[in-house]
Image: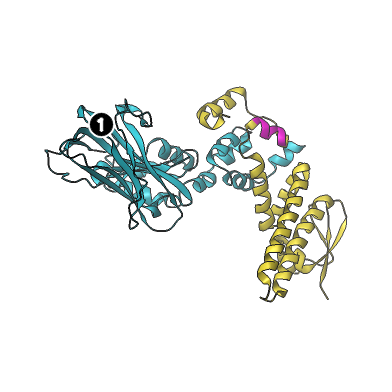
Chain colours: A cyan, B yellow
Amino acid sequence: MDNIIVNSLPAECISLIISLNSPPDACRLSAVSPAFKSAADSDTVWEKFLPSDYQQIIASSSASSSCSSSSVLLNSLSKKNLYFRLCNNPILIDDGNMCFGLEKESGKKCYMIGARALSIPCKDAPTFCLWKSIPESRFAEVVELKVMFWIDVKGRIETKILSPNTTYAAYLVYKLAEVTFGFKNGTVQLSVYFEGTDEPEKNYAALLDPAANKNSRQFLDGAGGWMEIEMGEFFVNGDDGRVVCSLFDMGGLINYKRGLVIQGIMVRPKH
Amino acid sequence: MAIMYALKSSDNEIFEVEQKVIEQSETIKKMIEDGAATGEIPLQVSSKTLAKVLEWCKQRQHKTVENENDDNKGKRKKERDEDDDIKEWENKFSDELKADKDVLFDLLLASNYLDLPALLSFLCQLVADMVAGKMPEEIRRMFNIENDFTPEEEKAITAEHGWAFQP
């Protein structure tokens, strides 16, 4: 009898109930009964979990992605499949200099600013910066900082492209080159701040050599031995603004460093 | 003098209701506008559920009338107090429905049939909160839903989204 009542609920009603919950709830609800499954898998539900401007973002990927049919392919997927595709296979946007994906648990936006889009002094001087393409990177090129008397790498991101009312953190995605020097004992300064405000004192000194720093950890992508280290966090309240993620070191002639490979700066919700 | 309408439940109970109260239902409003609401209005809703529907509509109506009669003076504080009152009333209303899930689902069906968007979204949110974070088995038990999946089907679904099923 009760079963009949639940089953007689209009599908839109069940869809609405499910879309008021989170993506993991929707997955669990899909295992309740076939009626719940068809509602929980529906485009109505997953369209709500996708960011409101997802179509625009996908459209901007076609020009940059190596696979020209990618936005056509993405648009052909069901909304649920598209959601998980964006979680598991982030897409390249902004002429291939930025990577966009979703956080599986919440559907919130994640970006990685590729090395080419970072501000790096002397970026075109081969003595200091070696650009190379390696298969286990999301981007066409990564940068190896060779001899460094000082490091001043900055990534900037507009807060309006991020999910509102969310605490984000920025992570440097890097590894040490085969020939490397100075990162085991010499620290670098990491910080995150809003552009236009004074640089905060919240700079913190970190050792990038994983042997010396247990806070650096395997980058979630797994492959390629990339590591990530948190640079700082910030809160997105929905206002316009720009966040600067900074890696700085004034090593000088004595404490100079060598051999840091940077894939980019990852910006994703922090828990 | 307020215009009254007589609503007849599926079990033949008559409810006398002010037009303003019952016009919140788009379905009935349309019947009145079309002149189809002469005499008793028969509804496919049980008396128990209809009583709940009207309880909701009267509370909403009460709120609207009071807001219209307010002048600005002291309105802020009054609004705050009223918000607290409404919150309290809604909590009590929710608790009663959580305790009697048959009525809850009957009410969901009725709010859909009578086209009461505010009640419908209130109830959907209520059910959404009840199932949040729960495992399929708990949800089935909570709402007495039979598991129509074969073990293989269920296994496939859980395997597809294993991450969501970790406690």
- Where residue A75 sits: x, y (%)? 40, 45
Q: What residue sits right under mark 1 in the picture? A: A183
Overall secondary structure of the magenta section: helix
Q: Is residue A157 left or right of residue B71?
A: left
Residue B56 in which image quadrant: bottom right
Q: Is residue B24 left or right of residue A149?
A: right
Does residue B141 belong to the magenta stretch? yes
Q: Is residue A152 visible?
A: yes
Q: Quadrant of the N terminus of chain B?
A: bottom right
Q: Crowding at label 1, few (<14), some or many (≥20) Cα neighbours within 10 Å? A: many
Please say if B73 is above or below A51.
below
- Where residue A5 sits: x, y (%)? 73, 41
Task: Tell which of B156 and A20 is nearer to you.
Answer: A20
Q: Quadrant of the C terminus of chain B?
A: top right
Q: Is residue A179 left or right of residue B18?
A: left
What's under tag 1, amino acid-wise? Answer: Phe
Please say if B121 is above or below A169.
below
Residue B50 in which image quadrant: bottom right
Residue A210 in which image quadrant: top left
Please say if B81 is above or below A4.
below
Q: Residue at x 81, y 72 (%)?
A: B3
Q: Residue at x 58, y 44 (%)?
A: A21
Task: Tell which of B11 and B19 is nearer to you.
Answer: B19
Disc 1: which chain?
A: A
- Where residue B94 sits: x, y (%)? 73, 49
Q: Which contiguous range is marked in magenta?
A: B137-142
Q: Residue at x 73, y 34 (%)?
A: B144
Task: Tell which of B123 and B47 is nearer to you.
Answer: B123
Which residue of the protein is positioned furthest toward the top in this rendering?
B152
- Helix, strand or loop status at disc 1: loop
Looking at the rendered structure, the number of numbered marks drawn on it comes to 1
